[in-house]
Image: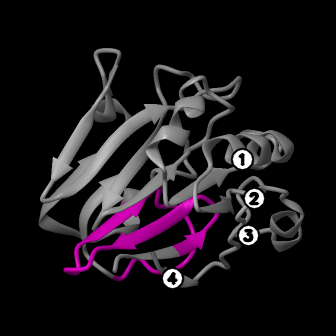
Amino acid sequence: MPKLLFQGHGSYRFTTDDGRVVYVDPFSGKGYDKPADMVLITHQHHDHNKISLITQKDTCTVITNAEALAGGEYKTFDIDGVKIEATEAYNSHHNKAECVGFILTIDGVAVYCSGDTGVTEQMKTFADRQLDYAIFNTDNMFTIPFEQSAEIAAVIGAKHNIPVHLAPIELFARGKAKKWAAPNKLILEPGQEIDL
């Protein structure tokens, strides 16, 4: 069973059944001690791309927004059985040509990682994917506003919805997470790791 560690802000780490480690948007919190097999970067804002926190294995694959959205096409990668699909991510603070989200399939578990975005047209198609988890960056300032993210979470219909990136730069904002009205809400504290 794969694991998810929420590090804080918009940073988290997946560990596969066989021990491979995937970091998404490293920036804050703890839990950078495991050498990386994969590092995913949704965009180049400073609070999403602190790759220097991570020790990379010699075989590590780093996929930034530039590789994930190349030539105007959202790319799909299969790295030793971990499927990584780039998705649309954009709003007034995030250029559509420079930002992505990801859908990861790890050990049969499908997880949507929104990155910093507003509601996109593509999100409305995700219900067909029958996602296990959706991780929403939602802060009412630079990402999807709370009310909209709760509404789109209902449309997407993931089995579990996790709010992150709840306030600019802050590690966590529990009060905001508790008020988030998405269905099937799962609140993770920084440093908390769960089985997926």
- Residue at numbered disc 3: 172
The disc placed on residue 194 is: 4
Helix, strand, or loop for circle 3?
A: loop
Query: In the image, residue 135 lies at what x, y percent?
Result: 58, 56
Mark 4–mark 2 distance (CA, rounded to whole Å): 19 Å
Q: Amino acid at mark 1?
A: Ala
Mark 3–mark 2 distance (CA, rounded to whole Å): 20 Å
In depth, the one of 176 and 62 nearer the eye is: 176
The disc placed on residue 183 is: 2
Mark 1–mark 4 distance (CA, rounded to whole Å): 22 Å
Q: Earlier in the sequence, mark 4 or mark 3?
A: 3
Q: Earlier in the sequence, mark 1 or mark 4?
A: 1
Asked whether disc 1 touches disc 4, contact meaning CB atoms under 8 Å apart, the reply is: no
In depth, the one of 18 and 26 nearer the eye is: 18
Sort mark 3 into few (<14), some (14-19) or many (20+) by Cα contacts within 10 Å: many
Q: Is residue 118 left or right of residue 49?
A: right
Q: Earlier in the sequence, mark 2 or mark 1?
A: 1
The disc placed on residue 154 is: 1
Q: Amino acid at mark 4?
A: Ile
Where is the N terminus found, in terms of image quarters? bottom left
